[in-house]
Amino acid sequence: MKWFKDEDFVRGNIPMTKFEVRAVTMAVLDIEEGDVLLDVGAGTGSISIQAAALGAEVTAIEREVEGAELITKNAEKLCVKVNVINGSAPEDINKVDGFNKVFVGGSGGNLRDIIKAADSKLKANGLIVGNFVTPDNMVTFKNCLKEFGYTEIEARLIQTANMDKIGLLKGQNPVFIVKGRKR
């Protein structure tokens, strides 16, 4: 198993989940060999690629052409397999067979519909996890999970800072990580 650092990824103008947040997200998703993960709003694919390296079968949905291309490039560069769909959620969730884990990294304003579509294909006892930079999206996600009858709903706020070459700490954006388990 390999843990990829941020500098391992080919980058563009698409947001990427940073290493420290990615590591916590993997722990919250509880990714194991044999899991089937759907990554919605996959960006550069850092979550998809790390999950694949941990043994999951991964499908990534990304609406931006640049993002979908970056996911493919990063998967090839880092020698993992990720099925990439350059499309939209919730519509393209129906193209994916059942899964036991869902990660929502981007929603394009369709958060409730994405959760509803993912819920229809998520296996019983499966996990759904979302990362959000705004409190509004975190609350919407949490409330939708309650509405759909999810259990073990948790939310946490992660903020990290990295030291630069001269010793100054540079803060990263705080990120809410929310999890729920389907009954």
Image (cartoon, grey):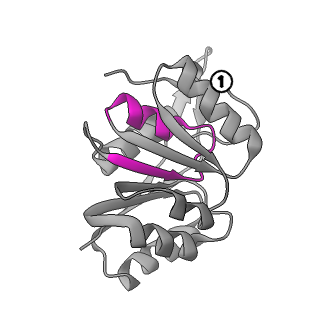
User: What kind of residue is marked 1?
Assistant: Val
- Magenta region, residue range: 36-55
Q: Is residue 120 above or below residue 173?
A: below
x, y (%) of residue 177? 43, 56
Q: Quadrant of the C terminus?
A: bottom left
x, y (%) of residue 106? 60, 56
Q: Nearer the viewer, residue 32 or 81?
A: 81
Residue neighbourhood size for the residue with mark 1, other residues' Cα within 10 Å, grouped as few (<14), some (14–19), many (≥20): some
Q: Nearer the viewer, residue 38 or 94?
A: 94
State whether residue 64 appears in this view.
yes
Count all numbered tags in the image, as a single digit. 1
Q: Is-magenta flag for residue 152?
A: no
Residue in the image at 36% along x and 21% along y: 2
Q: Is-magenta flag for residue 53?
A: yes
Q: Quadrant of residue 153?
A: bottom left
Residue in the image at 61% along x and 47% along y: 85
SS for dot 1: loop
Residue in the image at 40% along x and 33% along y: 52
x, y (%) of residue 24? 37, 43
Q: Nearer the viewer, residue 44 or 153?
A: 44
State whether residue 180 appears in this view.
no
Residue tagged 1: 10
x, y (%) of residue 94? 52, 64
